[in-house]
Image (spheres, rainbow, N blue to C red):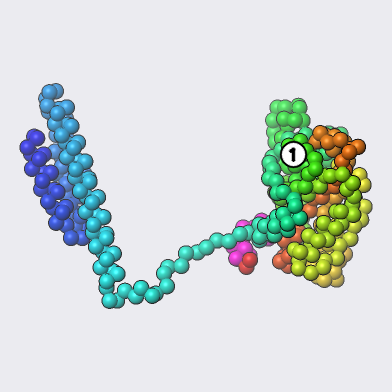
Amino acid sequence: MKSLLEQLRARIIQEIESAKTQDELKNIEIKYLGRNGELTIMLKGLKDLSAEEKPVIGKFANEVKIDIDKTFKGRAEVLEEENLAKACSNDDFDTTMPGTKFKMGHLHPLFQVQRDVERIFGQMGFAVIDGLEMDSEYYNFESLNIPETHPARDMQDTFFIKDKYHDFHKRMVMRTHTSPLQVRSMEKYGAPLRIIVPGRVFRYEATDASHDATFNQVEGMLIDKNISLAHLKGVMTEFLTRLFGKPVKVRFRPGYFPFVEPGIELDLSCLLCDAKGCRVCKHTGWMEFMGAGMTHPNVLRAGGIDPNIYQGWAFGFGLTRLTMMKYNIDDIRLLMSGNLKFLNQF
Ligand code: FA5
């Protein structure tokens, strides 16, 4: 059996080495290694050998198989290189022809604007922080001065994660805003603090042209000594002017959020209709853009910061709405639709 295997190995290797094309190589493989190939049949016969012969011949047969596989691979590589060289030297082959174009993807418009936001705030000394999309009830509500029985919970109805815990540190929710990162960042970095937190948030909400159930926000927080709302006005005016490349009209009005005192809302003059009134701004000429205010002393304390030494403000704006303004998109639901006809325009 050993000498038969030796003869067969020599024959197969000789045939492989004289193969001129990939097709010839494939046929040799089928002839010897296919289901009914000569070598396959011989290897199947190993089981009929005596107990003494089996390990010796088995080992040898294995070596033969490895030799043949190596020769196949080596010859395939040589033939491929020859083919390539032939194609390149072929007079018909025009090396100046443009190659095959790969279809390149691009950033989603939301993330194009997010990058601009990160760049502009970065230039103003704000660090960019990332957070959890599913966070504990404590960070999403309690730490922000919103206990379980507080009516303000109704303002941000959410998706609760089913579990067996009664402790709000362990009970999880899909975050309703990026604000859980306020106390998390204060705990981690202390004061002074200057951060923004872009991220996705979730609300149990009916959708329309300017409301979605999943949307993106950007949280901002500045904590230092002698900080007032005047700094917030300065930062936001500078940010919006740099983002839009022209002065943008904004208005401040009182707003209520349990984690700030006083609280304000900032509206953008609607750039989609030049403030004339459209379905996105609900025919008011103004688009609700962000909530903000001076950080409540209870929230500073929850973050381990002494409100008698430090003050700060925080804001949370809709990145999705900002993207609509930047690119004249008149329905928020298009942004999460995954519709390539829409997305390929950006
Ligand atoms: C908040 O989420 C507060 N966390 C903001 C805040 C942060 C206040 C820090 C004070 C201090 P509000 O629910 O208003 O607030 O949402 C903030 C912004 O998110 C809105 O102004 C709007 O631009 C955007 N927004 C809110 N709901 C939706 C929605 N359903 N679809 C799209 N954008 C929305």
**Residue 191 found in image quarter:** top right
Mark 1 highlights which residue? Answer: 189
Asked whether 219 falls inside the magenta stretch, the response is: no
Q: Quadrant of the C terminus?
A: bottom right
The residue that appears at 27% across and 71% down in the rendered structure is 89
Q: Establish if 232 lies above or below 170.
A: below
Amino acid tagged 1:
Tyr
Left or right? Give the position of 258 relative to 162: right
Closest to the observer, 27 or 195 = 195
**Residue 243 found in image quarter:** bottom right
Assess disc 1: are there few (<14), some (14-19) or many (≥20) residues with their C-alpha within 10 Å of its C-alpha: few
The residue that appears at 17% across and 31% down in the rendered structure is 58
Asked whether 336 falls inside the magenta stretch, the response is: yes
Secondary structure beneath disc 1? helix
Residue 320 visible to an observer of this rendering: no
Q: Establish if 124 lies above or below 43.
A: below
Please give the range of residues in magenta. 334-344
The residue that appears at 82% across and 71% down in the rendered structure is 274
Left or right? Give the position of 60 relative to 316: left
Expressed as whole percent of the image width and height from the top left, the position of residue 206 reads 77, 51
Closest to the observer, 122 or 268 = 122
Residue 9 visible to an observer of this rendering: yes
